[in-house]
Amino acid sequence: MIQKALKYQSGEEIRKGDHVLFHGESAEIELVVTDITSDPSLSWYLENEGPGVMVVEPKVFGRVYLQQTEKDEDLVFVSRA
């Protein structure tokens, strides 16, 4: 099964640079890795972790790679970059 887009729990498509809240903290989407990712620098994530997103939240968590984004109630879309 090819996963074309990753989505927030709200149904909005996740895009690189999105401003989000992660566990209530201001954060940003750094990477979006799907089965159709064409960027070779992301192939490690796809091969080792599977489709997902890298969330950057420097205050508490640092970087977190999430895979089950549609089920993650702690990842909330705020705005596009």
Image (cartoon, rainbow, N blue to C red):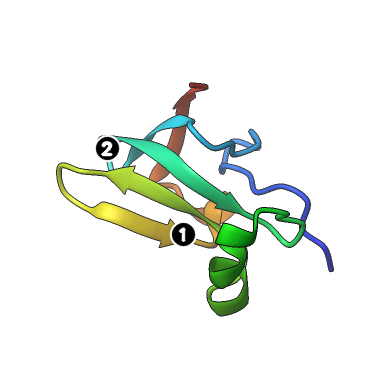
User: Picture quarter containing residue 3?
Assistant: bottom right
Task: Check the image and report above or below for 47 versus 51.
Answer: below
Task: Check the image and report above or below for 69 versus 7.
Answer: below
Nearer the observer, 5 or 46: 46
What residue is at 44 percent from the left and 36 percent from the top? 76
The numbered mark, 1 or 2, whose residue comes first in the sequence reads 2
How far across and how far down the image is residue 2, in percent? 82, 63
What residue is at 57 percent from the left and 42 percent from the top? 8
| Type of the residue with mark 2 | Gly
Circle nearer the viewer, 1 or 2: 1
Helix, strand or loop for disc 1: strand
What residue is at 65 percent from the left and 49 percent from the top? 6
How far across and how far down the image is residue 72, in percent? 47, 53
* Residue corresponding to mark 1: 66
How far across and how far down the image is residue 44, in percent? 55, 71
What residue is at 53 percent from the left and 73 percent from the top? 49
| Type of the residue with mark 1 | Leu
User: Picture quarter containing residue 38?
Assistant: bottom right
The residue positioned farthest toward the front in the image shown: 40
Nearer the observer, 60 or 11: 60
Q: Is residue 39 left or right of residue 49?
A: right
How far across and how far down the image is residue 56, in percent? 33, 45
Helix, strand or loop for disc 2: loop
Q: Is residue 60 left or right of residue 23?
A: left
Q: Residues within 10 Å of mark 2 (few under 14, many from 20)?
A: few
Q: Distance between the Cα atoms at labels 1 and 2?
A: 16 Å
* Residue corresponding to mark 2: 24
